[in-house]
Amino acid sequence: MIGCLPVSRLLLINPNTDTDMTQRMVAYAEAQFAGAVAIEAITARFGARYLTNRVSVTIAGHAVLDALACARGPFDAVLVACFGDPGREALASLCPVPVAGMAQASLIRAARLPGRFSIVTGGPEWKPMLVTLVQAMGLSARLASIRILPAAGNVLAQGGAEACRQIARACNEAVQEDGAARVVLGGAGLAGFAARIAPDVTAPVMCSLHESLQEVSSLLSRPAPQQHAWKSMETVGLSPELHRYLASGATVRACQD
């Protein structure tokens, strides 16, 4: 189901159930990779249309595993294309190929640069979840602030010029009031906004989708990780695809169709 091809192939999983968002992210990724990486995308079959709270993120963790089980490989890398990275660690424990998360990858890249970074995203319930994620990554000392806009990312994505003004204002506040050297604009819904607001922000703005795709490129350039074994799991009530996938056990087959 996953594995090594002569031409690198990325599985992009959208944990949100919004298929239009999936298509927008694929278009963005195809433009960024310019044919260097083949992309297959799959949208979560169940859960929230757009993740906004702990309940929706928890459900999405299950949906991400289900999406992997339903995808047709092989693949050379997997991207969990949501800033909360639901299911990423579980996915990585199953996959013999690199698994990146939108938040994990973009924050790592921000932390490699001098100075502290801030996160700007939409949806009030995201702040405590992102604090927990940053702490788990060991990056708390590198974080200047988390600035949250009231509207969720999918709403901001439809907001046009007014949304750009709101996002740019939050980014400038992070720079001027919180001491951020750069700002990570987090969320699938905000993909593409960084370039639009960059002229109006006094520090670099990093798009979480762009940065996570850059990190995928870096991961694909490295030697393939050693395959790992895992024990089969008896389950009830799961989709037939996920039930079979978890029951297979042993070493995950790298080049299974």
Image: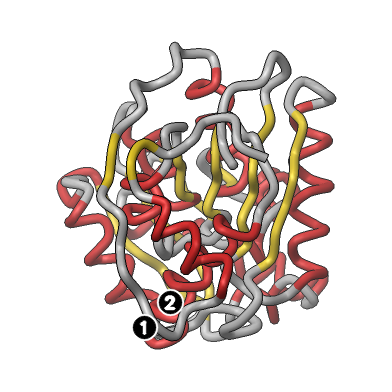
Q: Quadrant of the N terminus?
A: top right
The amino acid at mark 2 is Val
Looking at the picture, does residue 186 appear above or below residue 101?
Answer: below
Residue that appears at 82% across and 69% down = 20
Determine whether the residue tagged by mark 1 lies in a helix, strand or loop. helix
Does residue 81 appear to the left or right of 28 in the view shown? left
Write down the residue under mark 2. Answer: 57
Residue that appears at 59% across and 30% down = 255
- Pick whichever, 67 or 123, lies toward us: 67
Crowding at mark 1 (Cα within 10 Å: few <14, some 14-19, many 20+): some
Q: Position of residue 195 (x, y in %)?
A: 72, 44
Determine whether the residue tagged by mark 2 lies in a helix, strand or loop. helix
Residue that appears at 48% across and 57% down = 245
- Pick whichever, 164 or 60, lies toward us: 60
Looking at the picture, does residue 132 appear above or below residue 79?
Answer: below
Cβ–Cβ under 8 Å for marks 2 and 1: yes
Q: Which mark is residue 253?
A: none
Write down the residue under mark 1. Answer: 54
Does residue 31 appear to the left or right of 101 in the view shown? right
Residue 175 visible? The answer is no
Residue 217 visible? The answer is yes
